[in-house]
Image (tube, helix red, strand yellow):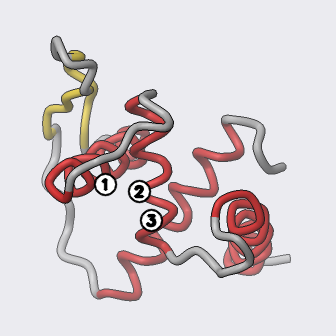
């Protein structure tokens, strides 16, 4: 099985599992999964978030997901419990499809590390 086929298989398993847990039968999209990761990383489950908070949660998730790739590094957690990251390297200019593949790869890796999928 090629790397792309394995990624697609793992992605499909992950989406199905997360959608079953959080989407009441709907299928979660990439942005929704990134948002869930942000909530997980913040650790303030069950809290209602404002629109600006939701954008910040997605930013936290993206930083955390791309940290292993060398683009960000964790800096500190502020007094409100929000993690902060520093940019180590600018992201390369990627086409939309390439961005999607990079994020899916990072998300699959994240959930494998958390032992949510194999």
In the image, 9 versus 70, the foreground residue is 9
Q: Which residue is mark 3?
A: 103
Label 2 CA crowd tier, 10 Å (few <14, some 14–19, many 20+): many
Q: Residue at 14% x, 40% y: name it.
A: 87
Label 1 CA crowd tier, 10 Å (few <14, some 14–19, many 20+): many
Q: Earlier in the sequence, mark 3 or mark 2?
A: 2
Q: Quadrant of the N terminus?
A: bottom right
Q: Residue at 65% x, 80% y: name it.
A: 27
Q: Residue at 14% x, 54% y: name it.
A: 52
Query: In the picture provided, is 6 more to the left or to the right than 104?
Result: right
Position of 62 relative to 45 (above/below): below
Label 3 CA crowd tier, 10 Å (few <14, some 14–19, many 20+): some
How far apart are labels 3 and 2 at the CA level? Answer: 13 Å
**x, y (%) of residue 85?**
20, 32
How far apart are labels 1 and 2 at the CA level? Answer: 5 Å
Say what secondary structure mark 3 lies in: helix
Q: Looking at the image, do the residues carrying marks 1 and 3 touch, with CB atoms under 8 Å apart?
A: no
Which of discs 1 and 3 lies nearer the camera? The answer is: 1
Query: In the picture provided, is 32 more to the left or to the right than 18?
Result: left
Say what secondary structure mark 2 lies in: helix
Residue 58: image tag: 1
**x, y (%) of residue 117?**
79, 50
Query: In the picture provided, is 23 more to the left or to the right than 78?
Result: right
Q: Residue furthest top?
A: 79
């Amino acid at each position: 099985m090629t790397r792309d086929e394995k990624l697609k298989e793992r992605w499909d398993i992950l989406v199905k599992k997360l959608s079953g847990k959080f989407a009441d039968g709907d299928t979660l999209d990439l942005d929704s999964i990134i948002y869930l990761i942000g909530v997980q990383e913040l650790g303030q489950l069950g809290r209602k978030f404002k629109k600006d908070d939701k954008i910040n949660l997605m930013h936290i998730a993206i930083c955390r997901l791309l940290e292993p790739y060398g683009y960000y590094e964790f800096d500190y957690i502020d007094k409100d419990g929000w993690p902060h990251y520093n940019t180590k390297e600018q992201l390369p200019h990627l086409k939309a499809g390439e961005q999607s593949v990079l994020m899916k790869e990072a998300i699959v890796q994240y959930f494998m590390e958390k032992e949510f999928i194999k």
